[in-house]
Structures are given as C-alpha cells and as structure tokens.
Amino acid sequence: MSSAALSDLATSSRNDFLDDVLAGLSQSQKSLSPKYFYDEAGSDLFEAICLTPEYYPTRTETALLAHVAPALSAWVQSGCVLVEFGSGASDKTRLLLDAMPQITTYMPIDISAGALEPAVDRIKDAYPGVTVVPVEADFTQPIATLDLATYPAVLGFFPGSTIGNFTPAEAAAFLKAARAMLGPKALFLVGADLVKDPAILVAAYDDAAGVTAAFNLNVLKRINTELGGDFDLAQFAHRARWNASDARMEMHLESLRDQIVHVGHHAFAFRKGETIHTENSHKFTVKGFGALALASGWTLVEQWLAPDDAFAAFLLERF
Ligand code: AVI
C-alpha cells in the first residue's frame, strides 16, 4: 500500500474513532466501544490480564482445548481448512494443529497486521506441512476474499469468549455471517465463558494488581493523545459489575467528581458517580448458547465443559 493510502486509512480510522467517541459521550448513559481498548498498549495490557491469577478464562479454555482437540479430531475430515476469527497470537490454534494433522490449511483472520504477521511466521515455522493463508480483515464485516469452496472440509474457530463482547443481536448476526462465510461443509468451534458465582466474575474483571483497571483507563489515554482530549485519569475509577438480568459483566469508568472534559472543541459534563460504560462480557448457559446457535442457522452437536462448568467449547454444525 502506498504511503498516501496508508495516511488516508489512518485519517479515516481517526475520524471513525472521533465520531464514535463524540456520539458515545453524548448519550445519557455515556459509552465507548470496547474495540478502542486495543491499541498497542491496550493489546499488551490484555495479554497481561490473561496472566493475572483472577482472570481464569484464558487458562481454563487452553486446558479445555487440550482435551477437546483429540476428541474433535473424529469430526474433521482430511484436507480441512481451519479458519480462525480474530486469531491474534494464534496460541490456542496450536492445540488444534497438534491434534489434527488432517488440517492442511490455516486461515487466520485478524484486523491487526502487527499481530497477524509474527503469528503467521511462528505457525509456518512450527508446522511446515500446513499452508498458511493470512487474511487481514475485520471479521465482524463480510469478507469477500474468503474462498473456501475448493476445500473438502471447513472448521471455523472462535475462541476466547470474544462472542461475549457482542450484544445478543450482534452475536446472532456474527454467527449468521460466519455461517455464510464458512459455507455448507462447515463445523464451527466456539469458546464461551459460562455463568458462575458473581464473586469469581467480579474478581476476574477487577484483579488486585490493577491490570484490568489500567486496560480500562487506557481508552481515556488514547482519547487524550489521539483526539486531543483532556481526561484527568486520576479522576476516573475502574468499576466491574455483574449485571444479573442481562447475564453479563460490565466495565465502567466512574467520574470521581463533577467535572468538564474536552475532546477537541467538544465539552462533556460529568457528575460525580456518573459512569462511561466501556464493555459488556456476556456469560452463557449451555441452553442459552444452544438457542443462540439455533436462531443463527447452527445446531449445537457437541459441548465440552471445563471443571466446575467454568468455560465451554461448543461444536456447531450448519443446518
Ligand atoms: C477479549 N474479551 C473476551 C475479554 C473479556 O473477558 O471480555 C476482554 C476483557 N475485558 C476485561 N478483561 C478482559
């Protein structure tokens, strides 16, 4: 891509960021999209969250997938292409590739070239027999370039309970779009966090070392540096709440005093105690996930649960 095209892209994504921030801070319940957490510092902080003792999902899913992969092997035909949505570092992928030599092509989809390129190099080095076809794209949008018709079998992979960061309507729309993208031969393995004791959930989203707090506050830092904001980070506090009626963890940033904050030429008034809602992380039941899948064109054909029903791997088949 030319430098002019790159600068156009940077300008348009800055404009999108600005438009979204101005719109989100103008609502009566102020909000910011969680997609803006993930600049380089935010991605590093997310990696650090995964290593905190309280944030169980990554560890639990990784241990679960080590059991799932050999069992899943019976479902997967030779010449299969593995398509991963939001592949990031492609760490969990290895558990599938190790157990299923019938996977001959790996197609990681990620919006971040910075994450995709080193991950692709590592997978190519470790699995020389696997053809790697990276796709740099936003997987929440239809991807025209995904051509899977020539593969005898297709396995979609969406780990990490990222599906929980969608609203229920967005989750259904994503599953329907994935169904269309993966085509008629598809199986789809989805990792999802399950409803549990709220004390465990709140601790997972409010670790004692304050890594999740730094991750949440990082979005204000981004607004200051990228959009000319003047948020005083010391005047906002990270809050993690369990919303039982919507079965979701919520992250908020609470204003610690009455204050006016500027983003460029726009001013936003905050009352003491008022929050900016920054993330939802929905937690599922097996029954609820099955219903979501069914409403989106998939049948739940197998499920594997971690000890204490802490996390699930769901295998979906197109109908
Ligand atoms: C990426 N996503 C699945 C994480 C989650 O658990 O919702 C993001 C996260 N937010 C706070 N901690 C981790």
Image (spheres, helix red, strand yellow):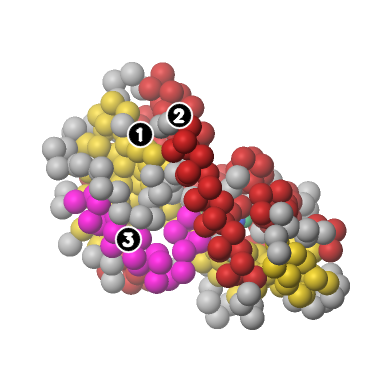
Q: Position of residue 259 (x, y in %)?
A: 83, 72
Q: Quadrant of the C terminus?
A: bottom left
Local secondary structure at mark 1? loop
Q: Is residue 168 magenta?
A: yes
Does the image show residue 145? yes
Q: Measuring 70% from the left and 67% from the top, which residue is drawn there?
A: 266
Is the CB–ligand 1 distance for label 1 below 8 Å?
A: no
Q: Earlier in the sequence, mark 1 or mark 2?
A: 2
Neighbourhood count class around disc 3 (C-alpha, 10 Å): few under 14, some 14–19, many 20 upward: many
Q: Nearer the viewer, residue 250 or 189?
A: 250
Q: Measuring 55% from the left and 80% from the top, which residue is drawn there?
A: 245
Q: Position of residue 186 (x, y in %)?
A: 22, 50
Q: Which residues are magenta?
A: 161-183
Location of mark 1 (residue):
134
Considering only vertical position in the picture, is 189 above or below 194? Answer: above
Q: Amino acid at mark 1?
A: Pro
Q: Secondary structure of the magenta portion, mostly?
A: helix
Does the image show residue 89? no
Q: Amino acid at mark 2?
A: Glu
Q: Is residue 272 magenta?
A: no
Q: Which mark is residue 175?
A: 3
